[in-house]
Each structure stands twice: as structure tokens, then as C-alpha cells.
Image (cartoon, rainbow, N blue to C red):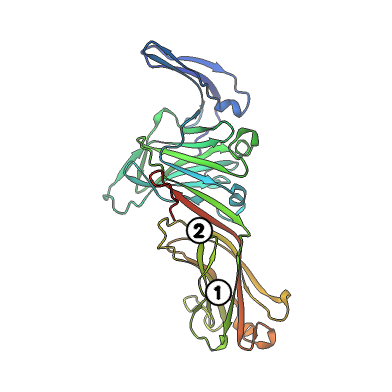
Amino acid sequence: MACRGSGTWQLSMVEIMMTRKPLHVLPLPLNDGRATYLLGRSVRIYGQSIVYNFIICIFFGSLTEILKYKRDFPPVDYSLKVNSYTLLSESKTEKYDTNVFEAGGHKWRLSFYPNGDLKNNGNGYISLYLEIVETNTKALNWEVTANFKFLVYDQMEDNYLTIQVANGVVRRFHAMKKEWGIAQLLPLETFKNPSLGYLVNDSCVFGVDVGVVNCSGNWESISMTKQPKKGTYTWKIENFCSLNKPFCSEVFNVEGLNWKLFIYPKGDSSHYGVKDKSCSFYLELVDWGSRQMKKAVYAEYNLKVLHQVDDDQHVERKASHWFKDHSLNWGYASFMPLKNLRDESKGFIVKDTLFVQVVFLVISVADGFSSKNKDKIK
């Protein structure tokens, strides 16, 4: 949902006193995007009364009012650092789902749309959502009510733009509605403006407070690495024509992750029309289940069957995939026709030996951290 309408915008300075005196409201002109986020830093003490001065921005005229202000302390429950925003935004993925975290006795995750949630009027904006997960153990008619705040780190001012639904509105999370958020969280034009500090050196940080303030200190960092070091693996397959069953390579490591190549010499029979007609070729992420941080891994890569005479005749196909628990291998069931592959005059098989290769183009690496244990979660 887009929490911003086409109505009038009003910027107000609100002086909140911890007394029974009425609030003092001073309207201010709205000149530019930066003005909507300013925060006064003065704190005045009158006897036992404390006065906080700050500027808030409320968007009127929509079904939901959005409150934006600055604060100094970081997200309470979870933070996401994106180290390579441009690569993530240019990748073929629509959104990035964070690792699961706990807040208020429930499990959650963030869904980050680097180019906006186009299905919910988020074009031209950063979109961010909060989703409750792992609900299969809850009662049949379970329901969780929570309010939340999204935060964007200002790296220039060392504070956080805080964005929330106004008036402390709570949301009902249940089986039919597990996700809430803001499709128009922050205009991309504002987010990418280097003078505003939200995107610096292609790095940005988002966070969330959920329900009761109870800092867990858990967070993760996601990096997108282009053309990773040692990102090419070549597999020599001898006696290829005598192979009848699926065959896998040795484990190889790229960016701290273990991988294997799988080839089906007579085609993957689980796919209709492939057996005895095409060679099937896949990349698989291994040891995923043994990792403490079971985080999805994104990769863009080229799968190749190498021509042993002419480099210009390699058969090459590009793939991209999020590798995760129930989807740990990805490739092509019909990579190339067997009649071309097995014909030695074509130059792919020489002396019953075949060479195949994978070249990684982009790969994501996620690290989890905890304030209770300063070591990374592997």
C-alpha cells in the first residue's frame, strides 16, 4: 500500500512539554525535500518540565498519514546494510528479503524493494515492508497487533530518518494479512541525492522498530559482488559417453560459499521431453543447511560447455537465481541437444572428454551479527 496521497502537505514545528499545558504549533513553509526532515536539537528544562523541539512532517489528504522525523539512536530490533545498492537495484531481483529476526516474541523479516514496489504504486520510491513469518506453530485464529517504525540512516548527520504511520496506529498481522509496510517510503530522487547522506559510497542502512522497545541488536549486512575473485570453475569430465546417471563435480568455493556443478549426460528425466534429447546442466549451492545463518544467496552466472577447438563456439547460457532452502540448484534442463554434444566432429567431446565451466558474474554475501556475540554469524 502507498501511504501517501495527493492532498495538502503541512510542515509544523511542535513543542511537546511534559506538563498539562497545551501544545504549541507553529506552521512553517515547505521549501524542499530536506526541510521535511529537519530536527531541532534543543532540549530545555523548566523545573521538572522538559521541552523537546523538533520538526515533524505529516502528509494530509490520504487514507493514512505518514510521520517523518529525525532521531539519534539506531533501530531497536533490526538493521539491514546494503553495501552495493547499485548492483542490487540493477539485478534481476524485484526485492530482497532479510534474514528472520525476533521481536516481541515473534519472528519477522523485512522486504526491501530497491526500485520500489511497482504493484503498489511504489514507482520512483524505496519500498519497505514488515512481514511476520514462521506462523505455522501459532493457534488457528492467531493474530498479532504491532506498530512499527522504519528508519533510514543519514550518514552525513549521523542520525536516522524515522518514518511511521502517524498517531501510533497499530497493524493487525494474521493469516490473511501477514505483511504491512510503506510503498512510498522515500523518493528515489531524495534517497540518491549525495548531499542528503542516505546513499554514500553506494552504501545505505535501513532498520525497523517493532512493538515494544527491546533492543535485540541483531542485524545483517548484504553485499553484491561483481565478477568475484576466483569466480570461474572448469570441470573436466572423462569417459563422458559412458556416463548414464547424473554426475556432480567436486565442491569448489566462491566468495566463502561452497558450490557443485551437476550434469545429466542423458537429460533430466524429471522434465518432460528432455530425456535422451538434451543435456541438463545445473549449479548447486551446498552446505546451506549447516550454516547457522540460513540466508538466501543471489547469483548471476554463465554456464558453458566448452568447444575444444574453437573458443568462439562455446555453448553458453546465462542464469540468475536466489539459492535458498527448497531451491538450492538452478540451471537448464535443456542446455543443448545431445546429438550436437555427442557428435565428436562438433568439437565438444574429444577423446571421450568434456569440459564444462561456470563463470560467476554477480554474487551476494550476507553476514549476520549480534550485540551479544560480536563475531559474525556464519
Q: Nearer the viewer, residue 175 or 216?
A: 216
Coordinates of residue 90 in the picture (x, y in percent): 62, 52
Which of the two marks, 1 or 2, is nearer to us in this view?
2
Q: Would you place residue 286 above or below residue 111 in this image?
A: below
Label 1 CA crowd tier, 10 Å (few <14, some 14–19, many 20+): many
Residue 307 appears anywhere in the view:
yes
Helix or strand or loop: what does disc 1 sit on? Answer: strand
Residue 1 seen in the current view: no
Residue designated by label 1? 281
Query: Could you tell me residue 94's position as x and y percent?
Result: 55, 52
Q: Quadrant of residue 174?
A: top left
Q: Is residue 357 left or right of residue 16?
A: right
Q: Which residue is more in the foreground, 123 or 25?
A: 25
Q: Which residue is mark 2?
A: 297
Q: Quadrant of the C terminus?
A: bottom left
Q: Residues within 10 Å of mark 2 (few under 14, many from 20)?
A: some
Residue 80 in the image: above or below residue 319:
above
For this orientation, the residue located farthest to the front is 374
Location of residue 189 in the rendering, given as x and y in whole percent from the top left corner: 63, 37
Nearer the observer, 257 or 94: 257
From this view, report whether residue 312 is shown above or below residue 145.
below
Circle nearer the N terminus (1, 2) = 1
Dot 1 amino acid type: Phe
> Residue 359: image x %, image y %?
62, 67
Residue at image coords 50%, 31%: 62
- SS class of the residue under badge 2? strand
Q: Is residue 133 above or below residue 280?
A: above
Name the image quarter holding residue 321.
bottom right
Amino acid carrying label 2: it is: Val
Q: Quadrant of residue 278?
A: bottom right
The span from disc 1 to disc 2 (Cα, nearest Å) is 19 Å
The residue lying furthest to the left in this view is 139
